[in-house]
Image (cartoon, rainbow, N blue to C red):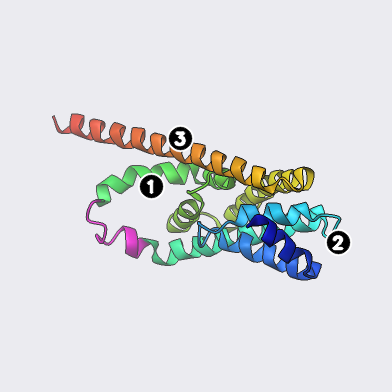
Amino acid sequence: MLESVINYLNVLDPSWIYLILFLFSFIENVFPPSPSDVVVVVGATMIGASGLGFIPILLITSVGSALGFILMYFVGKMFGEKIIRTGKLSFVSEEELKKPDEWFKKYGYKLILVNRFLPGTRSVISFFSGLHELDLGKTFLNSSISAFLWNAIIIYLGMTLGSNVEKIDNYLSAYSNIIFILTGVAVLVAVIYFLVKKRGQKK
């Protein structure tokens, strides 16, 4: 499948390839299952051969990713209160939200800074950044830095490993699975700690 994608992109004008890379980078925060990282890697394999450049790909994909992050930021800002705090989620009380609110306000910008390295949580982080109305300028800056660093790594991998795109895809999938499991364990530990502490306060 990846070979077919590479063959298809190879016949396109560089400007169209840049546009495709931008769109996939943009949509990754809006539609997380999007295989944006793999598409960026595929684009990186054509650096030089198709007139594409490392810096243009890096800048285009990083800006696309940051703008997608900001779109979800505004979704969280406009609709977050209605979704989270109006009682529609009956299993979450206003009291239970206080601690996460304080935690996100304290560490929110750091989470944004590492969001691209946390597969499966990118949309959540951008949504809650808007919900908590973090500073838009700092949010955009941090999300841009995060995207820039992550994309620099995967573009370099694509450029150096070239035709071994399948291997890179496997590496990215393994990395995503490991981070997803570690994130799940961290969340589970936090929930258990919260419940135990809450039960202790009732006694």
Would you say the magenta stretch is mainly helix, strand or loop? loop
Give how far across and how far down residue 105 sits, in percent.
Answer: 45, 46
Q: Is residue 164 left or right of residue 99?
A: right
Q: Select label 2 or label 3 by which is in front.
A: 2
Q: Which segment did they paint magenta?
A: 81-91
* Amino acid carrying mark 2 in the image: Gly
In the rendered image, the quadrant that contains the C terminus is top left
Helix, strand or loop under label 3: helix
* Amino acid carrying mark 3 in the image: Leu
- In the picture of the structure, the residue carrying the numbered disc 1 is 101
Helix, strand or loop under label 2: loop
- In the picture of the structure, the residue carrying the numbered disc 3 is 182
Give how far across and how far down residue 37 sits, in percent.
Answer: 62, 52
Which quarter of the figure has residue 39? bottom right
- In the picture of the structure, the residue carrying the numbered disc 2 is 51
Residue at (62, 46) in percent of width and height: 169
Residue in the foreground of this view, choosing between 26 and 194:
26
Nearest to N terminus: mark 3 or mark 1: 1
Nearest to N terminus: mark 2 or mark 1: 2
Magenta-drawn stretch contains 169: no
Q: Is residue 200 left or right of residue 76?
A: left
Give how far apart the Cα atoms at labels 2 and 3 are: 40 Å
In the rendered image, the quadrant that contains the N terminus is bottom right
Give how far apart the Cα atoms at labels 3 and 1 are: 22 Å
